[in-house]
Image (cartoon, helix red, strand yellow):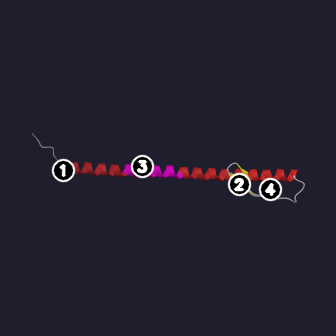
C-alpha cells in the first residue's frame, strides 16, 4: 500500500482557501460600499428635488399673491408661510 500523504499538497490547499476567503471578503466589502454610497446619493438627489419644488412653490405663491393684492401697506402675513413640510418667508 502506498502512502499518499504529501504535506506540500495540504499547505497549497490551505493557501488557496485563504486567498479565496480574502477575495470573497474584498468583493463583499466593495459591494456593500457601492450600495451604501448609492443610497446616500439617492437621498441627496431627493433632498435637492424637494428643495427645488419648495422654491418653485414659494415663487408661484408669491407671484399669485402680488397679482391679487393691490394694497401692499400690510405685509405682516408674508412671514412664516408653510407649504407641505417646509416654511418660507417672502
Q: CA distance from mark 1 to mark 3?
A: 32 Å
Identify the mark nearer the N-term, 3 or 4. 3
Check the image and name the residue furthest to the top: 1
Magenta-drawn stretch contains 26: yes
Foreground mark, 2 or 1, reads 2
Foreground mark, 1 or 3, reads 3
Residue for badge 4: 77
In terms of depth relative to the viewer, which is nearer, 65 or 31?
A: 65
> Which SS class for mark 1?
helix
Identify the mark nearer the N-term, 4 or 1. 1
Residue for badge 1: 7
Residue 28, position as x, y percentages in the image: 42, 49
Circles 1 and 3: CB distance less than 8 Å?
no
Query: Which SS does the magenta portion mostly show?
Result: helix
Check the image and name the residue furthest to the right: 70
- Magenta extent: 23-37
Task: State the residue at coordinates (35%, 52%).
Answer: 22
Q: CA distance from mark 2 to mark 3?
A: 43 Å
> Which SS class for mark 2?
strand
> Which SS class for mark 3?
helix
- Looking at the image, residue 21 sits to the left or right of residue 37; the answer is left
Identify the mark nearer the N-term, 2 or 1. 1
Q: Which mark is residue 28?
A: 3
Amino acid at each position: 500500500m502506498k502512502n499518499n500523504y504529501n504535506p506540500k499538497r495540504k499547505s497549497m490547499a490551505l493557501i488557496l482557501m485563504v486567498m479565496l476567503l480574502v477575495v470573497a471578503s474584498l468583493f463583499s466589502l466593495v459591494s456593500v460600499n457601492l450600495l451604501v454610497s448609492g443610497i446616500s446619493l439617492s437621498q441627496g438627489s431627493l433632498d435637492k428635488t424637494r428643495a427645488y419644488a419648495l422654491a418653485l412653490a414659494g415663487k408661484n405663491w408669491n407671484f399669485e399673491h402680488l397679482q391679487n393684492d393691490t394694497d401692499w401697506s400690510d405685509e405682516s402675513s408674508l412671514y412664516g408661510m408653510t407649504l407641505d413640510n417646509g416654511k418660507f418667508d417672502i
